[in-house]
Amino acid sequence: MTERTHLTLCLIFIGILCGFLSANAIAASDNMLSNVRQAATDHIRSLVLRPERGELQISAAELDNRLRIGDCQEPLNRSVPGKQSLNGNVTVLISCPTSGWQVYVPVQVSLLLPRVVAARPLARGAVIHASDLKVDQVETRFQRSIVFEYPEQIIGSTVKRNINMGEAVEGNDICLVCRNDSVIIKAGQSGLNIVTKGTALSDGSLGEEIRVQNNKSRRIVSATITAVGEVTVRY
């Protein structure tokens, strides 16, 4: 074997060795990035309680594989910097105490709870029937008003704005009692319960206070809506 041939073989071997080491370095980096993402996911999961009847979905974003972070010989430090809501987009800080590097990991958190949704498109002015509703898991961060877990709570109410199929039905979308509706007025004091009929003077949803007129005495009182067509006077 000539000296030139020997040198060529050495260069080829060195090239193969460098390529092998480089591939291992990239693989190690990819593995570490996966560990970082998992650490961020686990940290959020430890902070957010899964609801008994709901779902908790947590997903860490993919990290740039150009990040060069070495293996960490100790458990990774995890924290949520600042005052962040743990619903929606959350940034988790992952760091290695021995190597001194840190990475901010975007994490998407979705909390879903059972809510009454429209089983078909509901037009304004329609009276809601049982067949118009179903229960589905809905992400809580998109809810802006009173929500309902059971269809029975709103069957018989009137739609105030168009509701798309699959959309959660909220308190602002309906009136359990509408203006000029006949209502049952309930009142109680010292163990004595009084039930009479009245007329609603404004719209309202569950738990809201409206003015109603007693049909018999013509007296106007403030009452809380407790069900479809029903209000309660508190003394």
Image: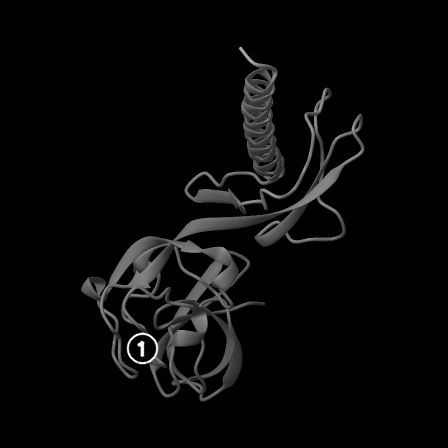
The C terminus is located in which quarter? bottom right
Note whether residue 205 is visible: no
The percent position of residue 188, horizontal first and vertical second, equals 50, 63
As displayed, is residue 123 above or below residue 19? below
As displayed, is residue 207 above or below residue 104? below
Quarter of the view holding residue 198: bottom left
Quarter of the view holding residue 24: top right
Residue 200 horizontal side relative to residue 6, left or right? left
Note whether residue 154 is visible: yes
Q: Nearer the viewer, residue 176 or 52?
A: 52
Residue ID at (53%, 45%): 62
- What residue is disc 1 on? 158
Residue ID at (78%, 29%): 99
The percent position of residue 88, horizontal first and vertical second, equals 56, 55
The percent position of residue 160, horizontal first and vertical second, equals 36, 81
Quarter of the view holding residue 46: top right
Q: Nearer the viewer, residue 202 or 2?
A: 2
Q: Nearer the viewer, residue 53 or 32?
A: 32
Q: How is the image coloured?
A: one colour
Q: Residues within 10 Å of mark 1 (few under 14, many from 20)?
A: many
The percent position of residue 180, horizontal first and vertical second, equals 36, 88
Q: Looking at this view, name the residue that lies furthest to the left.
A: 131
Residue 98 horizontal side relative to residue 71, left or right? right
